[in-house]
Amino acid sequence: MHHKRRRFALAVLDTKIFAVGGFDDQIGDLNSVEHYSIEQNTWTEDSPMNCCRYDFGAVPLSSYLYAVGGANGQKGSLNTVERYIPSVNTWTKIAPMKHCRGGLSVAVHCGKIFAINGMNEYMSIVDSVECYDEVSNTWSSVASTKTARFSGAAIVFPPRMPVYSKFHRHSLST
């Protein structure tokens, strides 16, 4: 990688592995983006995000890469979301989530992005979940996980979406 980073997001889009945002102890919050090409065995820098962020989620959907929520030193927890368009190497802002979420989990299921749990702007860990509809560019609230989590992980395994953290497991029905 070209940049030292921690608390960043990794996502696979097409055949590339993207390292997005994060934090560097000497620089601070990062908006830088780079990808690894398996075919070329190289890291290449991409256009930076509009907003510095760490403790966020990144997921691919419909040939785009999405950076969801997170936090930064200026605003704390974020509700902002950006979409990367690889064909033009550009990030665009899309509809924000209804609630700020740092340390959230994200997953794509049935063509929708789910933003799960995290920490809100009041430093409270939340059990709420939001769902993004790409066609209408809107977020809606869906059933909560009933247990608040921070820095968990989500995977999709039909027909349920398990959400894992260090100490809890809960499933969201689809």
Image (tube, rainbow, N blue to C red):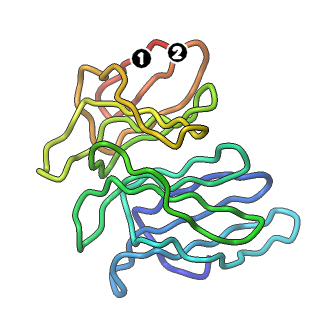
Tell me the distance, in whole angstroms, between the alpha carbons under discs 1 and 2. Answer: 6 Å
- Please tell me which residue lies in front, 147 or 101: 101
Image point 67% across, 53% down: which residue?
64
What type is the residue that disc 1 sits on?
Ser
Q: Residue 90 carries which label?
A: none
Label 1: which residue?
171
Between 113 and 153, the residue placed more toward the observer is 113
**Point 52% across, 37% down: residue:** 113
Q: In this view, does 132 lie to the left or right of 1?
A: left
Instruction: Say what secondary structure mark 1 lies in.
Output: strand
> From what the image shows, is residue 19 above or below residue 48?
above
Where is residue 30 drawn, in percent x and y?
Answer: 42, 76
Residue 11 percent location from the top left of the image: 61, 53
Q: In which quarter of the image is residue 18?
A: bottom right
Q: What residue is drawn where x is 20% and y is 47%? A: 120
* Quadrant in which the N terminus appears: bottom right
Q: Which of marks 1 and 2 is nearer the N terminus?
A: 2
Q: Position of residue 174 (x, y in %)?
A: 50, 14
Front residue (pair 42, 21): 21
Q: In which quarter of the image is residue 39?
A: bottom right
* Residue highlighted by disc 2: 160
Where in the figure is residue 165, as x and y percent of width and height?
35, 34
Judged from this view, the residue extending furthest toward the bottom is: 26
* Labels 1 & 2 near each other (Cβ < 8 A): yes
Q: Residue drawn 68% across and 59% down? A: 17
Is 8 on the left or on the right of 143, as rendered? right
Position above or below: 19 against 116: below
Q: Residue furthest front?
A: 136
Within 10 Å of disc 2 (Cα), the crowding (few <14, some 14-19, many 20+) is: some
Query: What is the crowding at mark 1: few (fewer than 14 residues within 10 Å), some, or many (at least 20)?
Result: some
Amino acid type indicated by mark 2: Arg
